[in-house]
Amino acid sequence: MIAQLQIDPTQLIEPWTARWFPQTLGSMLVGITCGVLGCFVVLRRMALIGDALSHAILPGVVVALLSLGWFGVQLDGLPPWFLAMWLLVGALGAGLLTAVLISLVQRKSRAKEDSAIGIAFTAMFAVGLILISSLPRGTHFDLECFIYGDPLAVQTPDLILMGVVCPAVLLTVALMYHRFKLISFDPVVAAAMGVSVAFAHYLLMGMLASTIVAGIKSTGVILVVAMVITPAAAAYQLTNRLWVMLVLAGTIGALSAGLGMSLAFMVNTPTGPAMVLVAALLFTLAVLFSPNHGWVFDRLRRLRLARHVAAEDVLKALYRLGPQPETGYVEPIGTETGLPPRKLVKTVARLCAEAVLTIEQGRLMLTQVGKRHARELVRAHRLWETYLVNEAGFTAEEVHATAEDLEHAHELSDALFEALGRPDQDPHGSEIPRREPG
Amino acid sequence: MAMDELVARIIGVTKVYQKHKAAPPVHALAGVDLDLPRGQYLSIMGPSGSGKSTLMNIIGCLDRPTEGAYLLGGDDVAKMDDTELSRVRGRHLGFVFQAFNLIPQLTVQENVAVPLFYQGIPAGERNRRAAAVLERVELADRMSHRPAQLSGGQMQRVAIARALVNEPSILLADEPTGNLDTKTGDTILALFDELHAQGLTIVMVTHDPGMADRCERVVRLRDGLIDVDEVGGKRPVTSSSAV
Ligand SMILES: Nc1ncnc2c1ncn2[C@@H]1O[C@H](COP(=O)(O)OP(=O)(O)O)[C@@H](O)[C@H]1O
Ligand SMILES: [Mg+2]
């Protein structure tokens, strides 16, 4: 069977209409909180623990629901805020139990930490799945929504949970900002300065568990961890400053949630995957376009450098060869510089436009500016050769190729000239041009 | 001040590491007794794996002993929980690390003021006290520099200033000259000498055999036990020379 995606662009704005706006706003709030907390998870390399927590919460929530039945409480008669808090208690309990299980497995078996985490959370998840089938008939527990996320299922108790947990978490992060920062940066120094690393760790875990419970209905248990990791990882591509990273991760989290809602309505899919897809897309953009580490700017920088080197090589070749016929310069200069014809023609055109080269009476030649620049390059080349032979111990035959690269750093020429004791000749006996006045 | 007044007492302390049930336990410390008089300059030496770092971590309240008692200023630290230990570290101990561990984004003065931040001391006083200790380590003219603009020796002096800013009862240093060349290392050791002459209690882990001449007492560890506890080359500070 071929799945058919029903794409309906008119649904794009549906999440922003009054009917769905509370759900959208709630999801965005969770997105901000997940993004902010995610920064610490990413920096402290705890992604696996985040995944563990989200899965481990299932039995906690189910037991919380079951226990209402044991006490004979009717779900319908319950105030929504009570149900919300009761579920939160169950989830936090399950999170705590998982933490204990992980350290128990680690201490009592040969399993290393990552295996211990894997064993503990899958076991908890399995318990949750089994318990679901024992929920009393009347209980509405939609497993599918728990796993994939569904805005239809986000009801008043969930909105209350989001409205309480998210501001509380953000406030705590603001208050603990300096401690968290020091711990993420250098846990050894943090401990020595009197910061309780263990307390901060458990606080972070507790906040993470609470946020995950708040977000689980809109994102689903499998993908909620992506809302924690992906926006923070994207922000990490863009900055090295923690507070900027927190702001960016929060923004990317909110965007992922908001745009994800629109996407989900448009193609009529669960909200969780749509939000995570948007987050992954934003992460990809961050990887490509990050000004410091990004692939695109890196390529641009390299391209610019390659162009610069090509231009200077052409200048030097013309300086050495003298003016060339306008129609026949490609062959001799191409041989001299090693540039392929197409690149050479482009470079010459660019240099003419910059008035470094000119064509007079059918001959390609250097302008005054071009001549001065070329002399600079020759000077740098010969100075570097002198340096490589006199100071670095190479022989005169070895240095040409290296100097060919180094000559592009001609802003160092004056310093080099002085350091070498104002030489007149390079190792091959050629004259080193003096710096032109002006 | 009486020489025999003790800052710290370590009584029958052991530290056993055991990765998991089936693994053989490692007795990093196998029963150590150590009294630390106020104002003493003690260096801990011993081959690699003999337990030096473990002992330092316990003296520094970064870790709790498996058995035994550790009395610091009258309290048994061995029984404290993590939050209390953190408080003790922040208020009563100063740490100097081999790799300096300064925060690159902060200025020298801000780095030194960091420990005071966690004690809720207002900004004005933090800056004033940081400036005062930087004066002591002769870096008053580098207050607004970043660590990257300093030499290794200067960075370690900033780290020492940071360790001193809370007026600790013990200054702990784990191979503080390990990342420095011999000459720079000597200037750092001279600074430790000077601080000791001013009455500071110092515990230092070192590999430098020359250290034995610089301090009052050398404790040599071997296999988690005190092998030798000897008087170093320097006379103990008398009460009159202590400040
Ligand atoms: N966290 C740890 N877990 C297990 N074994 C440890 C741990 N820390 C130290 N050890 C062991 O305890 C012994 C003493 O280590 P340490 O105090 O670091 O020695 P030193 O600093 O003198 O080189 C070593 O055998 C070391 O392998
Ligand atoms: Mg060691």
Image (cartoon, rainbow, N blue to C red):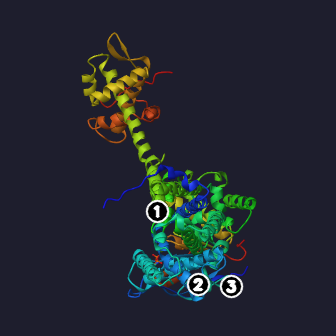
As drawn, A56 above or below A281: below
The front one of B77 and A120 is: A120
Q: For disc 1, does the CB lie below 8 Å from ligand 1?
A: no
Indicate the position of residue A173 as horizontal and vertical percent values: 62, 65
Determine if marks 1 and 3 fall on one subunit. no
Indicate the position of residue B21 as horizontal and vertical percent values: 41, 88
* Other-residue count near label 3 (Cα within 10 Å), few / some / many at <14 / 14–19 / ≥20: few
Q: Are marks 2 and 3 in contact (CB under 8 Å)?
A: no
Residue A270: mark: 1
Determine if marks 1 and 2 fall on one subunit. yes
Q: For disc 2, does the CB lie below 8 Å from ligand 1?
A: no
* Other-residue count near label 1 (Cα within 10 Å), few / some / many at <14 / 14–19 / ≥20: many
Task: Give the spatial CA distance, label 1 vs label 2.
Answer: 29 Å
Of helix, strand and loop, which one carries label 3? Answer: loop
Report the residue marked by disc 3.
Answer: B74
Report the residue marked by disc 2.
Answer: A68
Indicate the position of residue B161 as horizontal and vertical percent values: 64, 63
* Other-residue count near label 2 (Cα within 10 Å), few / some / many at <14 / 14–19 / ≥20: some
Which of pointers 1 and 3 indicates the residue nearer the eye?
A: 1
Task: Give the spatial CA distance, label 2 vs label 3.
Answer: 51 Å
Query: Which of the chains bears the disc numbered 1?
Result: A
Q: Amino acid at mark 3?
A: Gly
As drawn, B154 above or below B229: above
As drawn, A163 above or below A246: below
Image quadrant of residue A176?
bottom right
Of helix, strand and loop, which one carries label 1? Answer: loop
Quadrant where the C terminus of chain B is found in the figure: bottom right
Q: Amino acid at mark 2?
A: Leu
